[in-house]
Image (cartoon, rainbow, N blue to C red):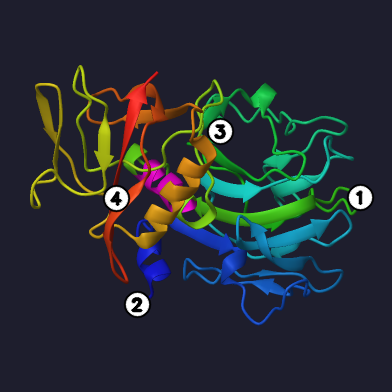
Amino acid sequence: MSILSDLETIVPRTGMISWHEARFITGVANAGAISSVPDHSGHGVTLTVAANKPTLDIDRANGREAIMFDGSNDPLIYGSALDQPKHIFTIAAYDDDTFAGYSGLIGPITSGADILVGEDGGTKFFNFTHGANYSYKRRAVALAESDQQAPMNDSLMIMEVVDSDGLSLTDFEIGQHRDHVDRKWNGPFVLNIMWSRILADVEVAAMYEYIACVYKLWRQTASGLNIWPFDPDWGRPMPRHKPVLSSTAVSGSSKSRSKGDKKRSVDAKFEDRFPEEFLAGEAFWDDHYPGTSFNYRDAAVSPSQDITMRFTSDLQEQSSDYRSSSYSFQATEV
């Protein structure tokens, strides 16, 4: 099994309806036309387009693949029945600073629940008033349905849609609003995964870790600080000592972490830490050192505590082989 396939095991599979990523497309050269996008969930929800096809960019998403819509391409469609999704993760961007027309990202082919449709001339997704059980997050920041800020100016963003009632998508398309040929997407589309249930908090965290490893995209706080993407096995921010975070346990396989005089047992997200995690950590460090602040979400306490921090050391790798990696760094609370 490849390293990347091992990494994919942290993506929650229970209740998964479909899993589409540009990086799973095969047999298409850079800038080549895309006829279909395979369903990585194993359920056969293959997306197809017959003509006026979008193209593949093999280096668009921080070194990874993206499907490029140019504002005139036909959408990718799945025309058969499927379970109603209750939780969706997607990564995409719109090419311009405002939407031209009601450009559709995800929605039904002819009828059903419109989901992510750009508001003509604006920078938000249209408010369809789905109801009290609908929620939208951009980079993990919850936004009101009337304020669904979209990813503009070709800047890729992680978006999360949740509706406990289920979204009416008996069929769906990516890249156009319903059957309106003048309401097409313009920009890169990278990932879309849908589940027939709402993910638990730990599963949501695993999704953000997966996205960090593959795409070097981070969660954010409401104030705009990027969040350190991984939950370390331990941390010890003592009163007069700089915090040290590590991907390895304090001792052996005890998987415990301590904060002051409090100790809590925690489970490692990965049986082995992947080299991709260390590379994502390096990319995060490159963006936030020297001197710039980031957020560390400390899950050793309940509820979790957000701490604004700055790196005070390099991100150091202790050991690495073909499938595992250990690293640590020092940081100081701002």
On screen, residue 295 versus residue 103, left or right, reads left
Q: Which residue is mark 1?
A: 182
What residue did someone put label 3 on? 137
Choose between 254 and 316: the one closer to the eye. 316
- 123 shown above or below 92: above
Is residue 207 in view from this perspective? no
Report the front residue among 70 and 4. Answer: 4
Q: Residues within 10 Å of mark 3 (few under 14, many from 20)?
A: some
Q: CA distance from mark 3 to mark 2?
A: 33 Å
**Could you tell which of marks 1 and 4 lies nearer the N-terminus?**
1
Could you tell me how far apart the alpha carbons at marks 4 and 3 are, in whole angstroms?
30 Å
Mark 4 crowd level (few <14, some 14–19, many ≥20, 10 Å Cα) = many
Q: Which mark, by number, is residue 1? A: 2
- Residue type at mark 3: give it: Lys
Instruction: Quote the CA–CA distance across marks 2 and 4.
Output: 23 Å
Q: Main secondary structure of the magenta part?
A: helix
3 or 2: tag closer to the N-terminus: 2
